[in-house]
Image: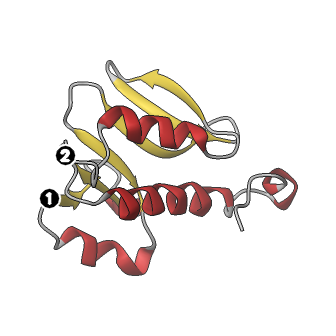
Amino acid sequence: MSERHLTAEQAAAFCLSLPEAREDYKWGGVRVFSVAGNKMFAVQDLAGAGLSFKVDDTLFLGYCDRPGVRAAPYLARAHWISVAPPYALGREELTELLRRSHQLVVRRLAKRLQVGLVIE
């Protein structure tokens, strides 16, 4: 894996570095990254099938048209995309999208729950 791309473990470590992020293992082999208890912002298949996360509604179709990116199974209607390893997105773009996914979820929380979670 080149230094221009994240490995699955690096992507997981980045997700956990975001404010108040936590992980759970669910559904027989899926690593779920969430904030505020149970609000998912990314999921990673432990079998290596991919990493899925939420994107801005207006960007969803554009990402789905890119090679190596597809609508996330079961979550596409909520504007989630999926990338399979080796991730088709570069390190900077992927970390920014994961950060943005985290923030999209945070901004839907009640204002009192957003304290300390918003990244400026």
Compared across the picture, whether 80 is left or right of 98 comes to left
Give the position of the C terminus as an image quadrant: bottom right
Question: In the depicted view, which residue is nearer to us: 79 or 99?
Answer: 99
From the top left corner, tell me how far across and down residue 68 is, in percent: 14, 58
Sequence-first disc among 2 and 1:
1
Q: Residue furthest right?
A: 112
Compared across the picture, whether 12 is left or right of 84 comes to right
Mark 2 → mark 1, Cα distance in angstroms: 7 Å
Q: Residue furthest front?
A: 3
Q: Which mark is residue 84?
A: 2
Residue at the location (59% across, 40% down)? 17
From the top left corner, tell me how far across and down residue 78 is, in percent: 42, 61
Residue at the location (24% across, 41% down)? 50
* Tags 2 and 1 touching, CB below 8 Å: yes
Figure quadrant of residue 90: bottom left
From the top left corner, tell me how far across and down residue 103 is, in percent: 61, 60
Figure quadrant of residue 48: top left
Residue identified by numbered label 1: 68
